[in-house]
Image (spheres, grey):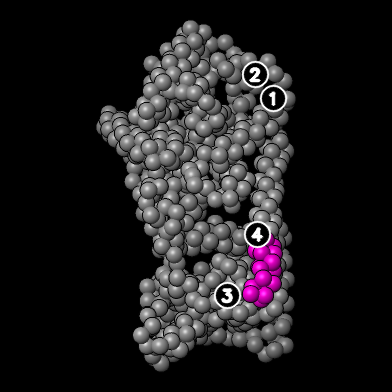
Amino acid sequence: MANAEHSGPPADGFGATAVGAARARLRAARIGLWLVAAVLAVRQVAVVLSTPRGERLTDLETWVGPDGVLHVNGSLYDSTRFTGTPFGGLVLKPLTKSAEQALGWGWTFGTLLLVVALGLLAARALPGPVSRRTSLLAAPLAVSLLMLSLPVRNSFWLGQTSIIPVLLVLAGCFAVRGQRACGVLIGVACALQPTLLLFAPLLWFTGRGRAAAATGATFAAATLVAWAAMPHDSYTYWVHHMAGAGLGGRADDLDNQSLHGALLRLGLDGPLEIALFLVLAATVAALGIRRAVRYARDGQLLLAVAITGCAAIAASPTAWQHQLLWVLLALVGRVGKKASDRYVWPVAVVLVMTLPGKMMLPNMAALYPLRENVVLLAALAAATFVPFLSRTSPYYQAPIPTPYADPVPTRFKHVPLVPFLRRVLARPNLLLELLLIRVTYAAYSKVRLAATGGSNSAGRERAEEHGQQILDLERFLHLDIEYALNHAVVKVDVVRNFFDFYYTSFHFVVPLTVLGLLYWRRPVDYRWARSALGFATLLALVGFWLYPLAPPRLMPGLGIIDTVHGVQDFSKPDYGTLTALTNQYAAMPSLHFGWSLWCGLVIAIVAAKAWMKALGLLHPFLTLTAIVVTGNHWVLDAAGGAAVVGAGFGLTYLLQGPRARPVTARAVSSEPLKDRTPS
């Protein structure tokens, strides 16, 4: 009893300490996220205001500048440069009396305040129950994502008003009291963007008939006021242009992410395209409203609002990039019964809304229709078929957990293991893996392309200087075999063709095949191998940036024959520098050899049979031969590739621990037979 009495206070103190530490971490995370949001906001404002006049706020300048359509006599729509409703023009006309420079600053900072308000409202509207961590971190995270999104960046740059309708709808649904006030705010949003009238049936079918009626009445009143003030403009907009269709840029432009724009890009035109668009738009609107009503009744009103907005995007004749914020709001929906699947939808939405389509999908002609309409596809998915979980589902709050291997001690006392590299025993979600691999490779290509050492001419000069340094070092080490091997292979067509084919074909095929087989047959080893490859590639990018290097084929006077690319023309000042595909001076370290060595080591470690191990190790040997005899790399480039691969495996071991499978196997073998279960 004495021991029990004395043991109580320390336990309570320890619990209080742990709770206090958790709260301190949450506060630190919240402050950090708000700092990130502030940095993004400052950067966004600085980019706009530091741009010369005439190149920034171009849409605003078109409307309210000295020669803007709101200044001149005649119709707003004579030049089709003004794409807003007559009510929008009526609201904006008083701004034409403001000084142009002051209006630019005021508009930019006003847009910033609108974005912050939108993020705060979205965070407030999250469906409950909401954890303390979510409630503290949601607002700064929402503001940061909005700042990063393409629609907000586009609105800042162009001086557009498209944030206002989204904010009015959210304010009507979540900030004001009373159905009448809700309907008035949403009605004003509809007067600015007519396709938002889809919110009226959402309100009606969710038991908010007064709000629906107020929405329709406010829209009608605003439209009639604009018609009375500007009858000719109103006739032009509503009758001649059929609610704004045909205003602005070409309807088949990539920025128009609506069904109408997609059909035009697919080559359809005329009455057939119009009829098909009307049928598809009506179908999407009906399905979207039906789904939105279901989730609103389930208590997920923010998700219902996002689904309705996504349906409005698809059903609108024109949905320009700055009008697509509804898709970003759809990431609040939860998809997937497993914890490992829970991140697929939000990650996909964030990537779609923050990155250009060409980074999402490869540069292949067969994928152009998908790449050109990636935001529209995301909106259609949210509006029609993504299986968002209901709050009554047992998986909404508690998804099926991901199995992990037993924890291992850190390698070094002051280097902790990284939490997101924990040794997972289950196969990761394939769609999420493909998304991340594609985006990571696109980012890798852009960084590699940018690592030129300055201007083209300066980059070439520096790279050739480094090339001479490598050649001198190889001569000192008696490794300068590039010229001899290159000219020996050129004389034998069969050998030359073989190594040219090997160099151009196996660089991507073999690593992707190894990753695919590991994913399917050895999911635990897949994560381990993928981490090592990622670290090695990241270290290689640092090498490309710090040490641009001309390969032997781009060294003038060396006499190396480029067997893959053909005859060189060194007379061009920028020859060999950046091309449309890749940076020609990203040679040290050689990832051709590095990735092949990674493949060989992984196969040698995980393969069950000796002949498989030998075949795997043959690949880096053939790759080394290919990169040297074709004139694309120095021998020391391969040494650099081996160094980053070794460092990649080392960092994986340091931050993740040993491979999970051997550890799990030992743990299982030590258990009683009746308790053993396959990993």
Identify the amino acid type marked 2.
Leu
The amino acid beneath tag 4 is Val
**Residue shown at 63% from the left, 78% from the top:** 410
Residue ID at (58%, 86%): 484
x and y percentages locating residue 418 in the rendered image: 60, 69
Range of residues picked out in magenta: 1-17
Which kind of residue does numbered mark 1 sit on? Leu
Instruction: Mark yes or no: residue 618 visible.
Output: no
Residue under numbered circle 3: 656
In the orientation shown, which residue stands out farthest toward the bottom? 610
Q: Is residue 663 above or below residue 152?
A: below
- Report how far apart the C-alphas of labels 4 and 2 lie in the structure: 53 Å
User: What residue is shown with label 4?
Assistant: 19
Q: Is residue 45 magenta?
A: no
| Residue 367 located left or right of residue 18 | left
Q: Position of residue 285 (x, y in %)?
A: 34, 33
- Residue 109 rendering spot, x and y as whole percentages: 68, 32
Tell which circle, 4 or 1, labels the residue nearer the N-terminal end.
4
Residue highlighted by disc 2: 95
Per the image, the residue denoted by label 1 is: 103
Query: Magenta-highlighted stretch: main secondary structure?
Result: helix
Query: Disc 3 or 1, which lies upstream in sequence?
Result: 1
Q: CB under 8 Å between callouts 2 and 1?
A: yes
Instruction: Please report whichever mark, 4 or 2, sits nearer to the chain's N-terminal start.
Output: 4
Element carrying mark 3 = helix
Closest to the observer, 670 or 590: 670
Neighbor class of circle 2 (other Cα within 10 Å; few <14, some 14-19, many 20+) is: some
